Amino acid sequence: MVNVLLVQIMKWPTLWIALALLAPSDALAQSSSAAANLRGCRAVGGTDRMTAEQALEAAYCGGALFALSQAASYMERPARFCAPQGAHIDQVARVVVSFFESVPERQNENFVGLALEGLRSAWPCGQ
């Protein structure tokens, strides 16, 4: 049942953001580091069965990454990144997870800031 819900959530990115906003405040407070979000980001786009908590973690990560992707075109250089045309949120999540795993000593840093750095590294904008 949770897998079906996750597939539906992935189809409606706005719902991801709503789910993240509805999360208990203590869960959000603990979600500010890259390490705290790694499990949820790994689950984005996954098809494995997961608990409701894991689905919420995936929704939180997916919503944050979707927001970054949508805001990218409005960012000034050097903060801007240029994802390939048609990149899906699961591709964005794989880039972020790969970057987080490549810098384990930095996983205590801010999730959004480190994710943005990873996306800029993987998909820099042309001059």
Image (cartoon, rainbow, N blue to C red):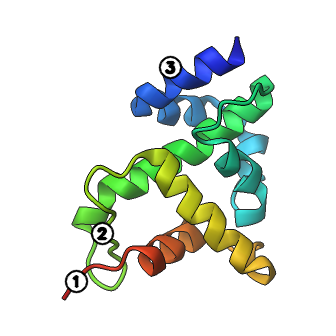
Which disc number belongs to residue 126?
Answer: 1
Q: Position of residue 78 (x, y in %)?
A: 33, 85
Q: Quadrant of the C terminus?
A: bottom left
Q: Residues within 10 Å of mark 1 (few under 14, many from 20)?
A: few
Residue type at mark 3? Answer: Gln
State the SS at label 3.
helix
Q: Position of residue 56 (x, y in %)?
A: 68, 32
Identify the residue under disc 3: 8
Quick one: label 1 or label 2, which is nearer the N terminus?
2
Q: Position of residue 3 (x, y in %)?
A: 66, 20
Check whether the beta carbons of the residues at disc 1 and disc 2 lie within 8 A of each other.
yes
| Residue 11 to residue 71: above or below | above
Identify the residue under disc 2: 82
Q: Quadrant of residue 21?
A: top right
Q: Quadrant of residue 109?
A: bottom right
User: Taking the image as drawn, is residue 33 in sight?
Assistant: no
What distance separates the C-alpha of mark 3 from that of mark 1? 34 Å
| Residue 82 to residue 91: above or below | below
